């Protein structure tokens, strides 16, 4: 079973653990950064351009709520109960002052993605300094790119004025370079899933991807990722990877959003029941990591192009995401797709139907798991995953 993979190499084990515990490390880092007088920015989404935030040396932390109790019941005293749990949890964490990242944030940056988030930001602005970037929702129009570039430019000016700093093009080029390297290493981590058997588990992949918004020393993080991939490849070559060399577990692609808050009852169970999560699709998935920011162009244009290309279900029409999904099925030799979405997430819930149709065309088994942050459906999730795994085996 891959889930409890503990590599024999203590150095590798330590690196994997540090990614697993990145959120805890982040809670200490945010306090230290605040005490050192650094500007703390809280954000929620892949569309928030971290290169602009990091350019003047500001620290960026994720404010996405991942837990049910106490933030969700508290949020439901103000927000509709039938709202996506990520939105409720994020809002409730600020309302109850439960989240250290929100507590220390000097500015919260939102973006107009789904309706629930947009309206929640209006209420969040009553509690925290807030800036919302307006995202166009058709990625294919030339005018979307122009409008988006203007929005990013406005955001850059907002940071300059609010915090009395100057963000030069050279500052942006520097942060673009490092975030390109960061994404390149993240893509290498997904590439480890292509090995047969995979050279990393899906849970380990997940912990590295979610560390992006908690480990703020980017250079150190990139070095660590690079070294980790090298060590994982070496362990695999020596037959000491997470699976025995003659093991061939069903290769699963995970698709969806807000997965971090439900990973114990979905991803962990999948690997517990013998599936190998070999890649992820969506805003934190392989396509986003593979596509670098063009370092030869004007940095703001290059940033606008990159961020308009994030594969998220809030875009419409969304052919780019479907094409990338199709390619990933082939490239990672996927045996089964599990789409994990949360209650009331309309964009991903609806697109899940189209992903299912693509799988049907390609003869790849597909399952849609709909869940939320509240406890109570763990048994039901396990039963459904068990049935899917049995079918794949
Ligand atoms: S799924 Fe879409 S809205 Fe959610 S964090 Fe990713 S890019 Fe943002
Ligand atoms: S999971 Fe869906 S509804 Fe929730 S914030 Fe993300 S896109 Fe919006």
Image: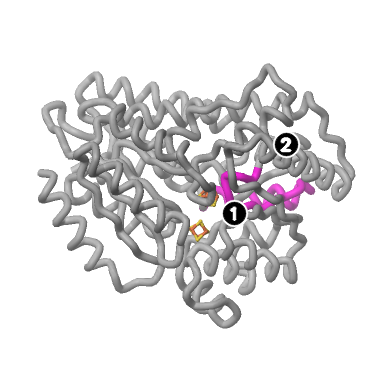
Q: Relative to 267, is 240 on the left or the right?
A: left
Find disc 1 in the rendering and name its residue.
113
Q: Residues within 10 Å of mark 1 (few under 14, many from 20)?
A: many
Q: Is residue 163 left or right of residue 345?
A: right
Which quarter of the rendered picture does the N terminus lie within? top left
Real-space Cα separation, disc 1 to disc 2, in angstroms: 18 Å
Answer whether residue 18 is visible to the viewer in this image. no
Residue at 60% over, 68% down: 91
Q: Residue furthest bottom?
A: 77
What residue is drawn where x is 85% and y is 47%? 163
Res. 146 mark: 2
Q: Residue furthest top?
A: 296
The yes-or-no answer for disc 2 within 8 Å of ligand 1 is no
Please state which of residues 72 and 310 is positioned toward the viewer in this rendering. 310
Q: Residue at x 45, y 39 (%)?
A: 319
Q: Is mark 1 within 8 Å of ligand 1?
A: yes
| One can see residue 103 in this view | yes
Q: What residue lies at 84% left-to-right and 42% top-to-bottom?
A: 157
Q: Specify the segment rendered in magenta.
A: 24-48
């Amino acid at each position: 079973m891959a889930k409890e993979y503990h590599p024999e190499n203590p150095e590798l084990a330590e690196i994997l653990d540090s990614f697993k515990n990145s959120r805890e490390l982040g809670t200490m880092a945010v306090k230290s950064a605040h005490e050192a007088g650094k500007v703390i920015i809280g954000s929620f989404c892949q569309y928030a351009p971290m290169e602009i935030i990091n350019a003047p040396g500001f620290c960026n932390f994720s404010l996405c709520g991942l837990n049910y109790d106490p933030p969700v019941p508290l949020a439901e005293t103000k927000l509709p109960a039938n709202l996506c749990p990520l939105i409720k949890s994020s809002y409730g964490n600020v309302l109850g002052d439960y989240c250290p990242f929100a507590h220390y944030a000097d500015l919260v940056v939102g973006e107009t993605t789904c309706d629930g988030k947009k309206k929640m930001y209006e209420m969040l602005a009553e509690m925290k300094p807030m800036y919302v970037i307006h995202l166009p929702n058709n990625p294919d129009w030339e005018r979307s790119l122009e409008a988006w570039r203007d929005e990013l430019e406005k955001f850059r000016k907002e940071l300059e004025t609010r915090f009395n700093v100057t963000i030069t093009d050279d500052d942006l080029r520097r942060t673009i370079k490092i975030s390109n390297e960061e994404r390149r290493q993240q893509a290498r981590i997904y590439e480890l899933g292509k090995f047969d058997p995979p050279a990393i588990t899906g849970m380990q992949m997940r912990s590295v991807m979610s560390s992006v918004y908690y480990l703020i020393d980017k250079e150190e993080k990139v070095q660590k990722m690079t070294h980790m991939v090298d060590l994982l490849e070496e362990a695999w070559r020596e037959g000491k990877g997470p699976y025995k060399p003659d093991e061939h577990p069903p290769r699963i692609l995970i698709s969806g959003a807000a997965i971090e808050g439900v990973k114990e009852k979905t991803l962990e169970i999948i690997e517990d029941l013998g599936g190998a999560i070999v890649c992820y699709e969506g805003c934190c998935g392989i396509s986003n990591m593979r596509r670098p920011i063009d370092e030869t162009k004007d940095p703001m244009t290059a940033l606008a192009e990159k961020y308009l290309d994030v594969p998220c279900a809030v875009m419409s029409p969304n052919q780019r995401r479907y094409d990338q999904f199709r390619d990933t099925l082939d490239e990672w030799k996927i045996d089964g797709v599990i789409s994990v979405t949360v209650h009331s997430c309309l964009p991903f819930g609806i697109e899940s139907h189209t992903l299912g149709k693509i799988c049907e065309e390609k003869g790849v088994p597909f399952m849609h798991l709909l869940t939320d942050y509240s406890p109570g459906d763990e048994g039901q999730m396990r039963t459904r995953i068990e049935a899917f795994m049995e079918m794949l085996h």
